[in-house]
Amino acid sequence: MVQADEHAAREQVLRRTWYSHDARWFMAVAAECGFAGANRLNREVIREVGRLEATRLCAAQALKPPANLAAFLAILEEGRDWFVPDELIAMQIEQEDERSYRVDVTRCFVAENIARAGVAAKYECGVFDRIAGWHEALGLPLDGMPPVQTCALAADRPCTRRLAVAPAGEARQRSGPA
């Protein structure tokens, strides 16, 4: 029988191995296709991964699609615990009003890895594309896609974004988790 400590250690090894694969795959694509193509493909794929994460988490936890931003943020926090806990990405999320919230990232394993690899000036952040995928999967799409930018933390800048869900008439473009 697997003990809780062993389960946590196994989970950490699996997660670290997956992210190591992801980093190596990105660098291989960048070497073959250039950074512009690798960044574009990475952001598309990570957005789709966000959709899958949200859908699969909701199915595994029998969660209903969120009716509002507060409910969405509660599901997102649960998902962060599953997929990118604080030891990987330290992120504070604060709801500002019925449609918007602020995200402050103070530590990010991606920023650390791209700085170590010497590609921070070329790498376009995909963290917020991943969150956009969550929004789409859960039926509360963002009011516009996050702007493309290089990693703020790797450039010693604050990583802060304000995200807003689309107005009510544009929301629920997707039916929610399958």
Image (cartoon, grey):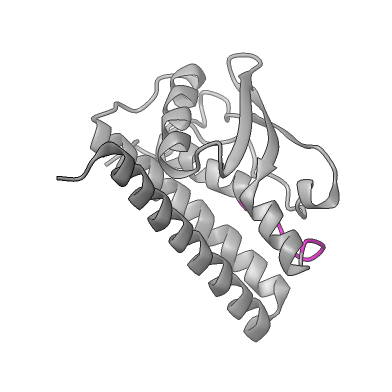
167 in relation to 131, above or below: above
- For the record, the magenta segment spans 120-126
Q: Nearer the viewer, residue 13 or 69?
A: 13
Q: Which residue is the extreme one toward the top?
A: 97
Q: Which residue is the extreme one toward the right?
A: 156
**170 drawn magenta:** no
Residue 116 left/right relative to 81: right
Asked if residue 169 shows in the view, the reply is yes
Residue at x-position 47% and y-position 40%: 134
86 in relation to 168, above or below: below
Dominant SS of magenta comes to loop
Residue 170 left/right relative to 90: left
Residue at x-position 65% and y-position 46%: 108
Q: Nearer the viewer, residue 133 or 172?
A: 133
The image position of residue 56, as x and y in percent, is 31, 44
Q: Which residue is the extreme one toward the left?
A: 1
Residue 151 left/right relative to 38: right
Quarter of the figure with the N terminus: top left
Asked if residue 125 shows in the view, the reply is no
The image position of residue 15, as x and y in percent, is 43, 54
The image position of residue 167, as x and y in percent, is 57, 25
The image position of residue 65, as x and y in percent, is 34, 28
Q: Nearer the viewer, residue 169 or 78?
A: 78
Residue at x-position 45% and y-position 62%: 17
72 in relation to 80, above or below: above
Residue 176 left/right relative to 115: left
**125 drawn magenta:** yes
Residue at x-position 61% and y-position 25%: 93
